[in-house]
Image (tube, rainbow, N blue to C red):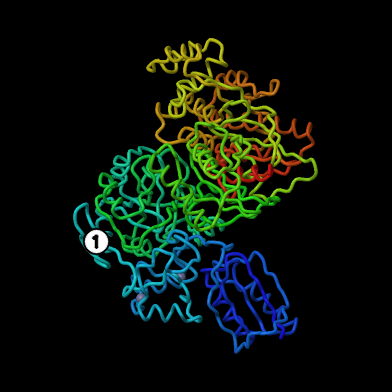
Amino acid sequence: MQIIELRIKGKVQGVGFRPFVWLLAQQHQLQGDVKNDGQGVVIRLAKIEQNALQHFLNDLHHKLPPLAQITDIQQQQKHLKNAPQFDGFVISESEQNAMDTQIVPDAATCSVCIADLFEPQNRRYHYPFTNCTHCGPRFTIIKAIPYDRKNTSMANFPLCSDCAAEYKNPADRRFHAQPNACPECGPHIWLQDYHHKIADNETALKQTALFLTKGKIIAVKGIGGFHLACDATNPIAVQALRERKHRPTKPLAIMVADLNSLLDLSPEEKNLLTSTAAPIVLLAKHKVPQICDLIAPHLAEIGVMLPSNPLQHLLLREVKRPLVMTSANPSGQPPVLDNQSAVENLQNLADFYLCHNRDILQRADDSLVRAAFDGIETLRRARGYVPNETELNIVNQKNILALGSDLKNTFCLLKGDKAVVSQHIGDTANDKVRLQLEDNLTLFQQIYQFKPEIIAIDAHSGYFSSAVGKALAEKWNIPVRTIWHHHAHLTAVLAEHHYQFERNEKVIGIALDGLGMGQHHQLWGGECLLVDYANCQYLGGLPAVALAGGDLAATQPWRNWLAHIQQFVPNWQALATHTCAELNWQPLAKAIEQKINAPLASSTGRLFDAVAFALGITPAKLSWEGEAACQLETLAMQSTFINQSAVEISTNLPVKMPIKDDKLDLATFWQSWLHYESDAANKAFCFHWALAQGFAQMAKMNAQKYQCKTIVLSGGVMHNQLLRRLLKVQLTEFKVLSGHEFPMNDGGLSLGQAAIAAAHY
Ligand SMILES: [Zn+2]
Ligand SMILES: [Zn+2]
């Protein structure tokens, strides 16, 4: 007997795909079966006409459930001696073998589940853990594959008879929804203080809302970690949160109940906010009414998200006001995941704890994105996007593990042409973050059954992530490839764009960031490079300037200002005396002169710090990374030049950053900039302009020399929208690529490292 076998790959498990196929097959009156296997889903059909099959395949592609995604369908006619006797169409038992199928990210509560939540007759009315195959937790509750309830943190909650009936019924939208639960059989919430439980369930919810309206700070357990919540309209509560968190100015994310709480949103912003990933979206401040000034001081944008789980929906409706929702972690540490650590570690931060008894197995911070002028821009990639897989346009037979960077650490597993980048893990300077990196590495290898054959690490030998990579390579006796930081930045963008090089083609890259290891152990951060996947050649960039005081330069902008004027401005002593008489600058100037604790680096980040300090807009000591640079961009956006054309600006502005040999001439820049008399906003703007013009010139010159048609922008500084726009405005004759799905900051580095390593083996 003849059958037709369809093998389907993609996101097809745990997303309601089999019941969808089952329903579709009923509608098409087909005979056969559908089941999961290690590769995805297999559909077997009793032989049918080609037309009927085509019709079925069309529907399969076009009527997919919301979280499903098909990447490939292979079709085969089979002659079977012992062919199965199909009686109608059924869902068969899963086969268990090596998995090569995608794990699905956590998805925000769907509209049908929200309706259940607020329908008083529904048995899940106000139940904070309702979900279905179209929504709910996935990645954060999984500890092994296949994605079955027994391999998730729902294993401790046996289904009641009603839930079991839904689970077994292909016509129900909770068919095989692994986290399916109800008040009868599922997890529950409670409110407690440090010592005692205060209330359960509905009372806990009501009491939490009441405390929030009274200005209390509550630790709320979510999907991928705890948040600290407080009333975003209450300056006293927000100030208390800032003081307890030792976070004087770093912007705080907020959560609003729905789109009606926001104004003037673009279609792109609406799409991002209501997407299944439900990230924090950076919005212009005027779009977010009612918010107190302390949420994002000195900045033009506020990070806003909508509720992404039922508990958040319930809470936001109950409090009837926006809430601050910031990750719950003592300074420098990763967010807490379990109830006990929350109570212990957050006792100086939270007044109360809204807990639940479903364990979080994978940490997933809120993702951070922006609907930028040139498309979606991802600044932090975690909940809702991880572990989506990315297909690269490369030839690779090996299993490659790339360890990323020490700041904004992520790692990447590359198998063939499929890359999976981990969630944002954070700054490995902290011991607990290091532990999480190692735990996550183990877990990812376990759930993907991934055995590395090559390890890729950053060229900075002092990085913890590099040390982890080397130790693993030694343990498994496999090769390690060290990779220049900025080559990885640029390659991450190429990889994300599936860039295919023509024969002998190279592209020009502009990589601007704080600091990274480059050629001959030089510290880079403002480079123009000639690259392909395998190679990277230095073309030019910013001159190296002392990092006065080593690491202190990253947090004290005046040190960079002093180093810059000392190197580039004649009679700088008079300027120093005039500008910072109260700072003890003379000993530092001497140390720079004598090259004591003053390593050289061509850092764009430190140049931003120096300019911000010269304008008097930055504190003596920064309290968060990028503070001075973000303030400088915000100020520049208020400039009268903002709406002028490139031609107008270039004729009106006396400040330039010309090219001298292969370097940007910072002496000319500083001297013309210091003499340029205008308000602070115009001075901030013309710094951006001069920098963009300098790098655009350098890129164009080299593109001509090496016959390149494509220019790639990357590095953390490229998240500066104004700078990126000014660069793109001047490079219109080229194909210009920048990062969208992956961060251009160090969060995207591991993807680039993996692609480079693949090009070498
Ligand atoms: Zn749902
Ligand atoms: Zn139940």
How packed is label 1: few (under 14 Cα within 10 Å), some, or many (20 or more)?
some
Quadrant where the image shows the C terminus: top right
Where residue 125 appears, as percent x and y from the top left, is: 34, 74
Depth check, front residue: 21 or 719? 21
Quadrant where the image shows the N terminus: bottom right
Residue found 57% across the figure and 81% down from its top: 23
> For residue 41, what is the image quadrant?
bottom right
Depth check, front residue: 579 or 60? 60
Looking at the image, residue 431 sits to the left or right of residue 371; the answer is left
Looking at the image, residue 417 sits to the left or right of residue 158; the answer is right
Looking at the image, residue 402 sits to the left or right of residue 352; the answer is right
**Could you tell me the amino acid type at mark 1?**
Gln
Q: Quadrant of ligand 2?
A: bottom left
Q: Is mark 1 within 8 Å of ligand 2?
A: no
Q: Pointer 1: what residue?
A: 207
Where residue 743 appears, as percent x and y from the top left, is: 55, 45
- Give the total of numbered labels: 1
Where residue 608 appears, as percent x and y from the top left, is: 52, 29
Where residue 365 appears, as percent x and y from the top left, is: 44, 51
Of helix, strand and loop, which one carries label 1? helix
Depth check, front residue: 578 or 504? 504
Depth check, front residue: 63 or 581? 63
